[in-house]
Amino acid sequence: MENKPMESMGLCVAVLKIGGLWHTRDMTQRNAILYNMLRTFVVIVLGAVTLQVYLYLFIMWGSLEDMFQTTAYSISLTVLSLKYHVMLFRNEEVDNIIQTVQKNFIIHGTELSTENRQIIKNTIKLAKRVAVAYATMQTFALITYTIIGPLTSFGVPLHTENATNISYESRISDRKLSMEMWVPIDISQSPQFEIAYIYVSVTSAINSWNLVAIEVFCMTTFIYIAGQFELLCDSIRNTSQRVMYRLNETQHPSSGNDHIDKPQKFTSDKKMKIQHSSANTESSVIPEKDEGVHPFGSAVTMAIQEENMANKTQYFASEQNDAIIRLGRNYDSLGGETYNLDIPGSFSNYQKEMERYLMECIKHHQKLIECSEKIDLLWKRVFFYQFLTASLLICFIGLKAISMPLNGEFAKTMEYLAAVIFQLGLYCTFGSNLMTQSEAVFNAAYESDWNNQSKHYKNCTRMLIMRAQRPVKLTAGRFGTLSLPLFTSMLRSSYSYLALLRQMQEH
């Protein structure tokens, strides 16, 4: 099935709608009333569970073992509450980001080369795989930790006749819910325990669904923005090829089919640049006579002798025309004909089209930067709290795990710890990937055919490179940039806190 960029966020929107985290602007009045009731219900569910966990933490204050696990729950629920706030009260910004991300897959209208389509396909496929993997992990955690866990926390079935009633009652009283929280009933007795068990299971399922919906939305936007920077790099790197295709289509219009999707036989701009510069290395970086400055630095220009400038510039102009003509002849157009640069005015049209194409790329670069800034502004306060408390969260869960025997409860705790680390690791991985792809715009611009173009084109390329040297960053507020170094630093801090608390516990 063909991937459709303008519908690439449809899965995220559908999951958010089911969870009651979407807006009602496009609904009828009746549907809006019903949907607002659903939204109110899911907010009450999260608020009730969070309040019960905090009440239990207050009641058990002073008991370190109980406090560690309950504090971990309270941190997770607080982070989820902050994300609820973003989705419900800043839904216009969320909707705007979704629409912008879908539109940003298109740079030059309907012009999509084979490489463009492959990049879009791979990006959407990666986002779907991450969504499925994360949803599967959370579903497995929900089933084993919340649903199966309490049923295996005692050794005797609830209604099995046993001669030793004292032992049976003792085992029944040891039953625990999957999440330590305050409940207004005595869960050591039946059927109160079963009622509390159903309540915790249902509320956990609702909160887990919305957690997955929000996390998948965040990760998908990160992946798509990084993929769109990769798409931009491909367009900039192969500017000459795409412009030559445009001119060929203008001179020999196609029959209406999307021929750009068919593989084209041409030499890339990077290879053309290497082939051209291999004949005379210095000539590939000599500026135009009236320019006087090399677009990427003055070191090379200072090395060129002043007395040879006129001769080398004349040689460069000749080589420039030869290279462009070779490029035009090597481009395999559909009709067997290519845009002829020997026709009077053709070279001027080619230069103008190159400048127009580059301006489209620069404008798209600005759109991607603005979209990334909007995403950062939307989530940075939430990520600040999440990463600020992540070290404590990992520390508390780890301390709980190392003080437990190797049983089912230990397996559940380690599963919770793995889910937390996996979630934070994904955020940092995609944040690093976004930085890498945004920085790659610099290399893509340098690898393009800038040295054979006009002065205006070189100036625009220079400005593009200067901006691309500052990578796009998604931050956790003042805590740091979402990246792998932040992730490793957070793990080191968690281990340090864990070692300190372990030493205090032993003494």
Image: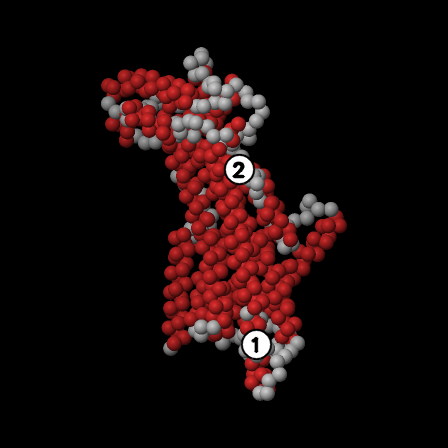
On the image, numbered disc 2 is attached to which residue?
105
- Percent from the top left, x then y, of residue 4? 57, 39
Give the residue at x 69% y 54%.
36
Cβ–Cβ below 8 Å for labels 1 and 2? no
Q: Earlier in the sequence, mark 1 or mark 2?
A: 2
Nearest to the observer: residue 178 or residue 183? 178
Looking at the image, residue 124 lies above or below residue 264: below
Q: Residues within 10 Å of mark 2 (few under 14, many from 20)?
A: many
- Percent from the top left, x then y, of residue 43? 64, 59
Nearest to the observer: residue 197 or residue 386? 197
> Disc 1 vs disc 2: which is toward the camera?
1
Give the residue at x 73% y 52%.
33
Nearest to the observer: residue 305 or residue 42? 42
At label 1, the amino acid type is Arg
- Percent from the top left, x then y, of residue 20? 65, 54
On residue 175, which mark appears?
1
